[in-house]
Image: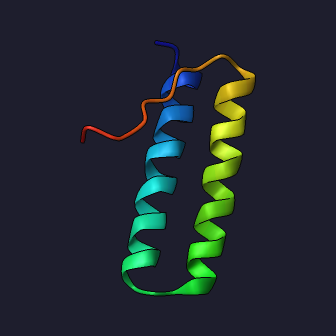
């Protein structure tokens, strides 16, 4: 795995964690930001052919 792939997957993992935290806190604004970041991170991974697991194992 290249550094770029690892960084892209880490970005997805962090965005997912932020989304979960925002939902648990019932913070609609942060949830919106996190959802946008996750969408961007997933798009970037897709565009570069990086397979993203459905869920994080960490």
Q: Is residue 49 left or right of residue 10?
A: right
Q: Indicate whether 8 appears above or below 1.
A: below
How many discs mark residues in the rendered view?
0
The image quadrant of residue 4 is top right
Closest to the observer, 36 or 8: 36
Q: Residue at x 71, y 37 (%)?
A: 43
* Picture residue at 49% right of the left edge, 34% below the top: 9
Residue farthest to the top, as pictured: 1
Q: Position of residue 35 (x, y in %)?
A: 62, 62
Residue 11, image x, y percentages: 53, 44
Q: Is residue 2 above or below residue 13?
A: above
Of residue 26 and residue 2, the one placed in the foreground of this image is 26
Q: Is residue 39 above or below residue 49?
A: below
* Residue 28 picture location, percent across and down: 58, 85
Left/right of residue 1 with respect to residue 50 in the rendered view = left
Image quadrant where one finds the C terminus: top left
Q: Residue at x 36, y 40 (%)?
A: 55
Q: In percent of the image, x 42 and y 30: which residue is there?
A: 53
Q: Position of residue 3 (x, y in %)?
A: 52, 21
Q: Residue furthest right?
A: 47
């Amino acid at each position: 795995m290249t550094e770029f792939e690892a960084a892209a997957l880490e970005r997805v993992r962090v965005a997912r964690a932020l989304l979960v935290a925002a939902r648990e806190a019932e913070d609609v604004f942060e949830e919106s930001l996190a959802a946008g970041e996750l969408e961007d991170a997933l798009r970037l991974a897709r565009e570069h052919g990086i397979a993203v697991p459905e869920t994080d194992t960490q």
